[in-house]
Structures are given as C-alpha cells and as structure tokens.
Amino acid sequence: MDLEKKLYTKSSKELTLRVETSRNPEDYKKYEEIRYSIWGDSNDNLASNRNLFSENIFTRGSSIFIGAYIDGKMVGFSYGYFGFDDLRGFSDTENIHFYSQYNGVVDGYRNDGIGYSMKIYQREIVENMGVGRILCTFDPLVSVNAHMNVSKLKSFILDYEENPYPGFAGNFNSLNIPSDRLLSLWVFDREREIPGYLDIDSVVIKVPEDYYEILESDADIALDWRLRTRELFKEYMKKRRFKIIDFIVSDTDKYYVLSKNSLC
C-alpha cells in the first residue's frame, strides 16, 4: 500500500498526499487545528489528540487520516472511518463501507483540484483494504460539492436528510438555517448511469450560483433557498421516488436533474 503520493494541482503546484501513521498522539493536534481553520465552528471539534491517535487504523482503530501538503505546509485533510450498514456487522464484506466525515481545503488553496485529489487517494487506500464503497453527506445547495459527488464521482444519491447536524455553525453553516444534506454512496465498481438527455419524466431543481456567498451576505435569502429546495427534494425524492441522475453547470444555471425512470 502506497502511504504517500506526489502529484500536481491544476495550477501545477507540487502536492503531497500522506496517510497518517504516527504513533505519537501530539502529531494528531494538526487535524483539529486545520479542521477549525476551514470550518470555523468552535462548538464542533474532533476528539482529543490521544483519542484521534487511538482511532487511527494504523494504531488500534478504524479511521484513516490523509493530509495534503504543499511546500511542507498542510493545506487540506481528509478524515473518515470504516463502518457497516446494519447489525450483520463485519461478518459480510458487502455490509462494510467507509464513511468520509471531513474533506476540506484551507482558504487560498481551493479551486485547485486538491479536494478531488484527496477523494481519489482516499478511494485507493480504502479499496486496497478490500472495501468498495464510500458514504458521505453534502449540502445540496453547494454546487462545488454537488458537482464533485454527482458529476465527477458519479455517486448514487440515497436520501435527502433534514437538518442532521442541528446547531452546526461556523464558516459554511448557520445556527438559524437547517443543515440539510444529501446522502451519497460512491460505489467503486459501478458508476451511476447518466443518460445524456432529459425524458418526459425528468425534472430539474436549481441551486444558487454561490450559496456560501448568500449565507454570508443575507441569511433570510439563504434560508429561503433552503426551505424552497427542501420541499422540492422531498416532493420528488421521497413522495414520487425520483432519483438524482446528474448535476449540470451551465453558463447561466446550476441544477440537479431527477428522473422517475432512472436505474440509479
């Protein structure tokens, strides 16, 4: 297993991705520091250094920590852990998944492909350990996350979750706006089919150009986006059993495509 990988960002910066294997608890302090610098919520935090060390699959747990470095500086990290779907536990390998909890890049290094590179590297590590699925959640109003999960990774969108993280604030969330999420499943050996056209039963759900900008500038408009799109997702995904089949970024709009006839 290759525990370090060197590649280049979209702007040709040399990027090093490294899986954490340290047995010194103090080496895990940097993961909480960078989590806070990215998300900025003091009421949400990772476990203590000692507990993070104990969580690591290379010590005695089931978690994987990946750091992204440019010129020796940590500019991003990915963190997740192995789990299972139901009480069959680990007795059936098809019941095992990896849950990707955090995947973030510090300000000043975003939009350079680092987040996507960490996801691909995470997949390589997880697949090498014999597991073929990664679960995660993402905010349906954030187009960059929708584009990566739906369009690039071709993940299956399993569900729309209403406010699964109450009290979540910081840079990308607000205490006054529900933290709705889409539950995404990335299956390594089976890509979601994208038909390339809209049939008569297709619908689209538009999202804002930049939700984070709206969240920062006008909380009332951000809340309106959340509540209006929530009702649409609930109507089509939960009541009518439509599936998300694509996410489109055009010159004028960003929107999900849902279809009732999808095999996704």
Image (cartoon, grey):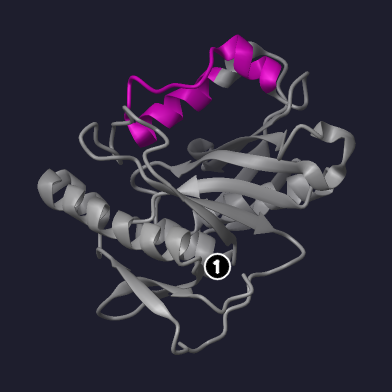
Q: Which residues are magenta?
A: 29-55
- Residue 2 visible in image: no
User: Which residue in the protein does label 1 denote?
Assistant: 152
- Crowding around mark 1 (Cα neighbors within 10 Å: few <14, some 14 to 19, many 20+) is few
Expressed as whole percent of the image width and height from the top left, the position of residue 155 reads 59, 62
* Above or below for 214 versus 179: below
Query: Number of callouts in the render?
Result: 1
Is residue 195 found left or right of 45 in the rendered image?
right
Q: Could you say whether the residue bearing mark 1 is in a helix, strand or loop?
A: helix
Expressed as whole percent of the image width and height from the top left, the position of residue 69 reads 54, 41
The quadrant in which residue 219 appears is top left
Q: In the rendered structure, does residue 49 fall within the stretch colored magenta?
A: yes
Is residue 129 found left or right of 119 in the rendered image?
right
Q: Residue at x 67, y 47 (%)?
A: 122
Q: In the rendered structure, does residue 117 fall within the stretch colored magenta?
A: no
| Quadrant where the image shows the N terminus | top right
* Above or below for 90 versus 205: above
Our reading of the magenta stretch's main secondary structure is helix
Expressed as whole percent of the image width and height from the top left, the position of residue 17 reads 63, 44
| Quadrant where the image shows the C terminus | bottom right
Nearest the eye: 131 or 107: 131
* Above or below for 122 versus 117: above
Nearest the eye: 9 or 106: 106
The quadrant in which residue 66 appears is top right
